Amino acid sequence: MPTVTFVQPDGSAVEVSGTPGTSMMNTAVSNDVKGIVADCGGNLACATCHVYVNPADEAKFPPASDEEIEMLDEVFSVRHDNSRLSCQLNLPESSDPITVTIPDAQW
């Protein structure tokens, strides 16, 4: 079972277990992780589930689609090369841990 460490802007972190194939956004929301707003419910329409994927973990996910790239233009916080929308990141089968940082604001 994959584990995701969500690092808050203040440096505190929470580690949660997820189900392979489930989106990182749903995993965060179902575990009450602060900072993942998910206004659109994972429909790629709001950019309120923005995260910064640890560079060592980026290869665990497919590249962003054109639609995700367009929506990343709408993020409230600073966009970085490792910015992704957690609704588009399905947890892999691997049990390797994943670390993401939540931006200081989503909206």
Image (cartoon, rainbow, N blue to C red):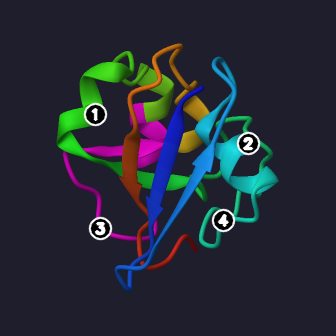
Q: Name the spot of residue 102 as percent of width and height, x first.
A: 44, 65
- Point out which mark residue 78 bears: 3
Q: CA distance from mark 1 to mark 3?
A: 20 Å
Front residue of this view, candidates 5 and 48: 5
Answer whether labels 4 and 1 touch (C-beta < 8 Å): no
The residue labelled by disc 4 is 33
Circle 2: residue type: Asn
Q: Closest to the observer: 36 or 13?
A: 13
Nearer-N-terminus badge (4/1): 4
Q: Secondary structure at mark 2?
A: helix
Image position, residue 23 (x, y; %): 65, 32
Foreground of the two, 95 or 28: 95
| Camera-nearest label, 1 or 3 | 1
Tell me, yes or no, whether the highlighted magenta stretch contains residue 15.
Answer: no
Q: Say whether residue 38 is visible.
A: yes
- Whichever of labels 1 and 2 marks the residue nearer the N terminus, that label is 2
User: Would you call the spot at circle 4 few (<14 residues within 10 Å), some (14-19), or many (20 or more)?
Assistant: some
Instruction: Kindly identify which residue carries mark 2.
Output: 26
- The residue that appears at 59% across and 71% down in the rendered structure is 35
Disc 4 vs disc 3: which is toward the camera?
4
Residue at 67% x, 52% y: name it: 28
The residue where tag 1 is placed is: 57
Q: Secondary structure at mark 3?
A: loop
Q: CA distance from mark 2 to mark 3?
A: 23 Å
Who comes first in sequence, dot 4 or dot 3?
4
Residue contact between numbered discs 4 and 3, judged by CB atoms under 8 Å:
no
What segment is highlighted magenta in the picture?
A: 69-85
**Looking at the figure, which quarter contains the C terminus?**
bottom right
